[in-house]
Amino acid sequence: MQKIGKYENSAEVLKILAHPVRLGLIETMIANGPTNVTSMYEEFKMPQSTISQHLSKLKSAKIISGTRKGLEIYYEVVDDRAKSILSTLA
């Protein structure tokens, strides 16, 4: 049971990342550095609400963090496992 327990956190991260939009958002943030929602929804051609929902899931899992600059929030990847996973997939 101990062997399974040590993978619980990693499995949760993989579940959150297991969506093409979220993988794309992570890739964009890694490539561009801190990025705001406006830039993301323009790049992905999706409604802002859809992008925000995906960002919310990533933020709640502590894969990304947001920093407010004026009226905008800039998001960046803070989880090294997510960066490693993306580099493996690329």
Image (tube, rainbow, N blue to C red):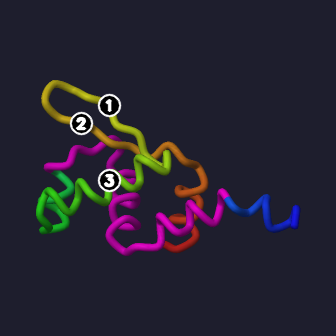
- Give the x, y percent position of residue 20: 37, 74
Q: Is residue 40 shown above or below 11?
A: above
Label of residue 12 in the image: none
Where is mark 1, residue-wise?
67
Q: Which residues are magenta?
A: 9-38
Q: CA distance from mark 1 to mark 3?
A: 13 Å
* Residue at the image position 58 percent from the left and 62 percent from the top: 12
- Going by the numbered disc 1, the residue's amino acid type is Thr
Q: Earlier in the sequence, mark 2 or mark 1?
A: 1
Q: CA distance from mark 3 to mark 2?
A: 11 Å
Decide: few, some or many residues near mark 2? Use Cα within 10 Å; few <14, some 14-19, many ≥20.
Answer: some
Query: Could you tell me which secondary element the residue under label 1 belongs to?
Result: strand
Contact (Cβ within 8 Å) of mark 2 with mark 1:
yes
Where is mark 2, residue-wise?
73
Q: Is residue 24 magenta?
A: yes
Query: Could you tell me which secondary element the residue under label 3 belongs to?
Result: helix
Q: Is residue 28 magenta?
A: yes
